[in-house]
Image (spheres, rainbow, N blue to C red):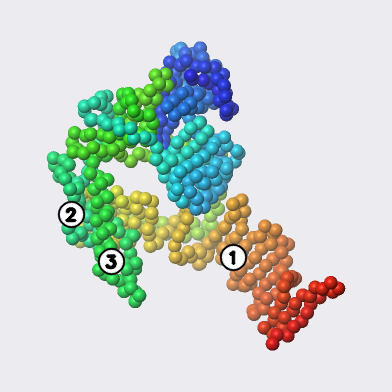
Amino acid sequence: MISVYPPNEREFADNGLKILKPTKAIVHKVDNGDYYLELKDKIENREYYQSGNIIRVPSPWGKQGFRISKIAIKNKEISIKANHLFYDTQNYVIEDSYVVERNCNDALDHLNMAADTPTPFKTISDVPTIHSYRCVRKTLGQAISGVVKRWGGHLVRDNWKIEIRSTIGQDRGVSLNYGKNIIHLKASENWDKVCTKVLPVGKDGLLLPEVWVSYGEELYDIPYTKIVSFAQGDIKSEDYEDKDQKVDEAAYKEALINNLRIQAKNYLNENCVPKVEYTLEAYIKDVSDVGDTIYVNHPKCKLQFTTNVVSLDYDVILGRITRIEFGNFQSGGLKDLVKSIDSKIDEKVVQSIDTNIASLRRELTEATNAIRDKLGESYVIYDGDRILVVDKLPKEEAVNVIMINSGGIGFSQTGINGIFNSAWSIDGTLDMQQVNVINLVCDMIKGGVLKLGSNLNQSGVIELYDQANTLICQVDMDGITMFCKDGRTIKINADEGFVGYASDGTKIYWVSQKEFHMKRSVVEDEITIANGLRFIPINTDTNQGIGIVAMA
């Protein structure tokens, strides 16, 4: 039964404004992506197809609500597109909220409660990973998108309930034979990375004692052999130093070799079969949702590989799934999950100091000119599974090298087999010895030295806020200032030392030379001076006062 409800419906306790009988009703659902309803009906029912109204349809995942967003009329037929109720998250804005070291479930709850107005959504997750996330001027939908990207998992949308699950779908043993029991198939295959035998190269050109790592059996009629360089930045020589800070070279090399062997085996496991994307327009009985497992028998592969349903179309009128898309490729993630919102919430909040901007622009100009000066002195080489940009040919004689592969981008000044001291890896890690930026926004900074307020950075400031977004501490070129809730301030700086101020700005305690001064003092128990004299409060039934005791 397909029903239509007014825009403000929350409970769906009745049949709504009307029970509809459309001529077409297809639900399109993508893992971590689009989720909408396309419907066609006779023009006689035009009055019920109003923008904002909710269409509720039966599905394999229960009755789901879709809010009408687009309406088109042609001749005597009306067509509508309605987004799942999840997309109402675009109507709630988070001004500024910070999730600090929380699991995914806590992060969702925190952000849902941080919206400008109470939302109808309930959130839950079973992803245990701990992360932090700063959300500034974003819709709730954009915030959830950020959570999925940072914590991982799959977005499950059930009317007003939003879940992020570690895994979704079921394995019912669905097996498809390419070219035999499947028809109307659109297939996309990428064999570029297929590899069954690899020569791994590690740090400083390190090779394995056995040199090669192979899959162990012939999977194809022709060989798929590659030379692959692997980053080994996690294996550090200082971890193998003895008490005299001398590196145990044998242990260090053994660790590098073991790590290189493991990376090579993982590479083979991930790339021994082609990356495929199939679209099947047929009814498959045992598929019920995105994430479901499908086993594919490919005629060119001597093994069966596993894929998952990444999108599907469900025909509400026929009551069955009529189209699925599946593959072992990495999906595009949150494709079109949240659209951009009205620019009224994108206000200017950054105030820049002219002198700093001028300095940074000068540095950027110098860097740009340095790059342009090298045009004509650089050579680009496609080298199997990587791209090299070198300053000299042949490549073995190059000194300055940029290497690009599936692991990221690396920079070396010691040749193609040298040390890549700077890198931007595919997981988002930026490893640099020096970084100059105009504006940096991030969730967490971990490091050794943070230099602020020098003659190169006159306006260096650190601000700390509590959960109510109230400034509680500021570190700048004048020192450290802490702000108390009752208006008092505490300052620590080179000129005044340690000073406390009342809410009216009056100095109430401070350190001067070797002395501690205070306007007023309350001592609860006793005062001991120079370990020779004690002042002790005396309270009896008849008297109160102070006793002075000389210490032996």
Image side of residue 294 versus residue 541, left or right = left
Mark-to-mark CA distance, 1 and 2: 58 Å
Please name the residue shown 79% across and 75% down the image: 538
Residue under label 3: 252
| Secondary structure beneath label 2 | loop
Dot 2 or dot 3: first in sequence order is 2
Among the 4 quarters of the image, the one containing residue 271: top left
Residue at the right extreme of this rendering: 542
Kindly report the distance in space between the C-alpha atoms of the residues bearing marks 2 and 3: 21 Å
Where does label 2 land, which residue?
A: 212
Vertical arrangement, residue 368 with respect to residue 114, above or below: below
Q: Residue at x 49, y 57 (%)?
A: 357
Query: Residue 406's spot in the image, x, y percent?
Result: 29, 49
Which mark, residue 480? 1
Image quadrant where residue 206 sits: bottom left
Q: Quadrant of residue 50?
A: top right
- Packing grade of label 2 (10 A; few <14, some 14-19, many >=20) is some
Secondary structure state at the residue bearing disc 1: strand
Image point 55% across, 53% down: which residue?
351
Q: For residue 290, which numbered disc appears in the image?
A: none
Q: Is residue 108 above or below residue 479?
A: above
What crowding class fits label 3: few (fewer than 14 Cα within 10 Å), some (14-19), or many (20 or more)? some
Which is more foreground, mark 1 or mark 2? 2
* Residue 487, percent from left and from top: 69, 59
Asked if residue 70 can be seen in this view, the reply is no
Of callouts 1 and 3, the N-terminal one: 3
Q: Is residue 302 visible?
A: yes
